Amino acid sequence: QVRLVESGGDSVQAGGSLTLSCAASGFTLRSRCMAWFRQAPGKEREAITVISTTGAWTAYTAPVKGRFTIRRDNAENTLYLQMNTLRSEDTADYYCAAGPASSCASYTWTQESSYNDWGQGTHVTVSS
């Protein structure tokens, strides 16, 4: 059974840092394009970052570029999101998603339809 489980969500002060984890089971992470999405209160879910199967290619959306870092540990079957300099607008539910390797392309990675498997989410609250 394919499963993605996020953890690490918490309440932090603006300017603080958090690291989210996404543990995969039931499949081998190394063959999948992996991404993080988030959904803020009252807003649609949006892609924020993606990493290719080997980790050689990453991409970020403008709101998080320079502050967030995605990485993967294929040996541990785990995806991570390091979030620094957090802002109140980063408050959201964060989801990891897995798709085929081909999803890791500049014209597809931000689309939810590019991913087959999703975690249940972990909540991050940033207070100012």
Image (spheres, helix red, strand yellow):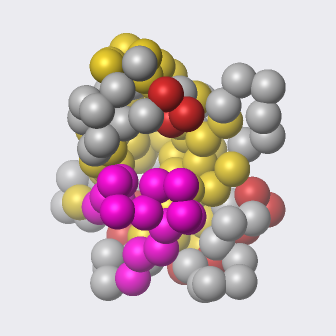
Can residue 85 be seen in this snapshot?
yes
- Nearer to me, 116 or 80: 80
Most distant residue in the front direction: 128
Q: Which image quadrant: the N terminus?
A: top right
The residue positioned 28% from the left and 32% from the top of the image is 15
Which of the 4 image quarters holds residue 62? bottom right
Q: Is residue 62 magenta?
A: yes
Which range of residues does the magenta coloring cover? 57-72
Res 31 seen here: no
Is residue 46 rendered to the left or right of residue 23?
right
Query: For the point 60% across and 41% down, which residue is it?
Result: 38
Rendering coords of residue 93 (x, y %): 58, 29
Judging depth in this view, the residue of 36 and 91 nearest the camera is 91
Q: Nearer the viewer, residue 47 or 99?
A: 47
Please identify the quarter of the rendering in which residue 111 is found.
bottom right
As displayed, is residue 121 above or below residue 69? above
The correct choice, above or below, for 14 with respect to 51 in the image is above
User: Residue 3 versus residue 47: which sits nearer the camera?
Assistant: 47
Total numbered circles: 0
Image check: 67 left or right of 127? left
Residue 61 point in image, percent of width and height: 56, 64
Vertical placement of residue 26 versus 50, above or below: above
Q: Position of residue 58 (x, y in %)?
A: 41, 75
What residue sits 32% from the left and 19% below the top? Answer: 12
* Quadrant including the C terminus: top left
Question: Magenta span has 110?
Answer: no
